[in-house]
Image: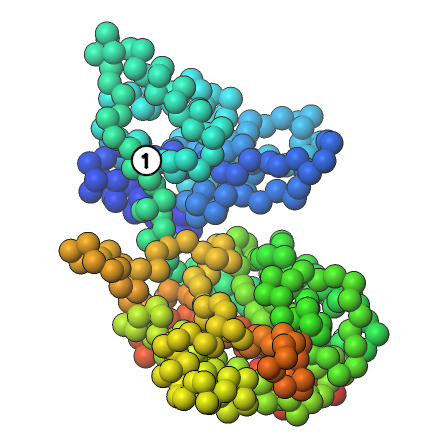
Amino acid sequence: MTDSPYAARRARVIEAMNRLGGGVAIIPTAPEVPRNRDSDYPYRHDSYFYYLSGFTEPEAVVVLDSRNGQSILFCRAKNEEREIWDGYRYGPEAAREVFGFDAAYSIDELDARLPQLLANVPALFYALGASARQDEQIRGWLNTVRAQSRAGVTAPESAHDVRAILDEMRLVKDAHEIGIMARAGKISAQAHVRAMQTSRPGLREYHLEAELLYEFRRHGSQFPAYGSIVATGANACVLHYRAGDTECRDGDLCLIDAACELDGYASDITRTFPINGKFTAAQRTLYDIVLASQQAAIDATRAGARFDAPHEAAVRVLAQGMLDTGLLKTDTHGSVDDVIASKAYSRYYMHRTGHWIGMDVHDCGEYRETAPNGGERPWRALRENMVLTVEPGIYVRPAPDVDERWWNIGIRIEDDAVVTANGCTLLTRGVPVDADEIEALMRG
């Protein structure tokens, strides 16, 4: 994998370690997790580990040594009997060559070799507190090093959270990552199209979820990026609702927030559409408000803008829509500015307009910058090739002071946006957002 990005990322981490005085970094992958009895959950690697290795097998650790610039992989040894049961293993020798490491050893050698690597280094770089089991391993290795103090061997005198380095690296995507995310977005969009075209009264939410999952796997996705939200009628007003057995009823909306993971990278799409293929007048009114708010947020997404600029743009449109429709009363809230200042909009729009997305659907990276002179931390400025979601919504629960025509209407529209110098590029518009286009798609 000489032309892969993984070795280059490891080199960048080592450079960052050296700027902090140097040391050894330890980045383990995720453990296998039992589901019940002798059955495990489907295995998914740790994102930080995969970002530096491209390696998907369990029981593996990346070690970076800034003293000599070396990257080392510990992984499972070849074992014909286990491979018959569990599948192919690279083994250290093949993994070293294929994944571009300077050295590779069996995971069985980890406890013997780590104290040697940690001896006489100034600092340890590690995800402090991320895993009690891994913390215990680290303590054991450090105590082994300290036991040699009479021989002049020293243990690391300081520790750094390696995630602080990796979070900043992962926040700005390279061409390799954006290419995968674009393909993931395309697959997810195709799945939403299939769900819209399948929709009809009488189906259950899980029927539509099955169509999504089928389309994900049919096009090569390894997993859903998160638990699929398929919510009809009143369920669409529950933000993290999971697909259940509720019947899709004639005249109701269906909100689907679902997307796939491809080669370690997530996509994230939400669409809201009428079960019978035709918006009612009330549904269309609120839908168009949400769509206009999303467009305002998209227009505000560009390099140099603050992270909260898209949210502020969306809120202004939503607030005006709430006043225009009577969801918020003008005799109580005289203007859009009043609505925003009092946060009255949060009754119907209670979440933010976006989040980072990448290897994790809610990806790593700080949303605020360091505060000058210890004051309030400002929202960070967007940079080219950051990727975030844009997802405003309106959710109206029944209440005595709310006109019944709006009851149980839940609408969210979400796309994934790559920040560019002059705006953003949407990765997920393979499924329509315009109400007329949705109705035409469903008729077809």
Q: How is the image coloured?
A: rainbow
Residue 242 position (above or below residue 20)? below
Q: Position of residue 184 (x, y in %)?
A: 56, 64
- Left or right of 124 in this view: 130: right
Specify whether residue 123 is in view. yes
Report helix, strand or loop for mark 1.
strand
The amino acid sitting under disc 1 is Phe
As rendered, which of 321 and 179 lies closer to the eye? 321
Residue 67 position (above or below residue 348)? above
Q: Position of residue 440 (x, y in %)?
A: 68, 89
Specify whether residue 64 is in view. no
Q: Position of residue 137 (x, y in %)?
A: 44, 24
Residue extending furthest left?
373
- Left or right of 385 in this view: 354: right
As rendered, which of 138 and 372 lies closer to the eye? 372
- Left or right of 104 in this view: 89: right
Residue at horizontal 51 percent and vertical 84 percent from the top: 328
As rendered, which of 355 and 181 lies closer to the eye? 355
Residue at horizontal 62 percent and vertical 66 percent from the top: 238
Q: In which image quadrant can residue 25 be found?
A: top left
Which residue is the site of mark 1?
125
As rendered, which of 4 and 281 lies closer to the eye? 281
Q: Position of residue 51 (x, y in %)?
A: 43, 48
Residue at horizontal 46 percent and vertical 61 percent from the top: 357
Q: In which image quadrant can residue 116 be found?
A: top left
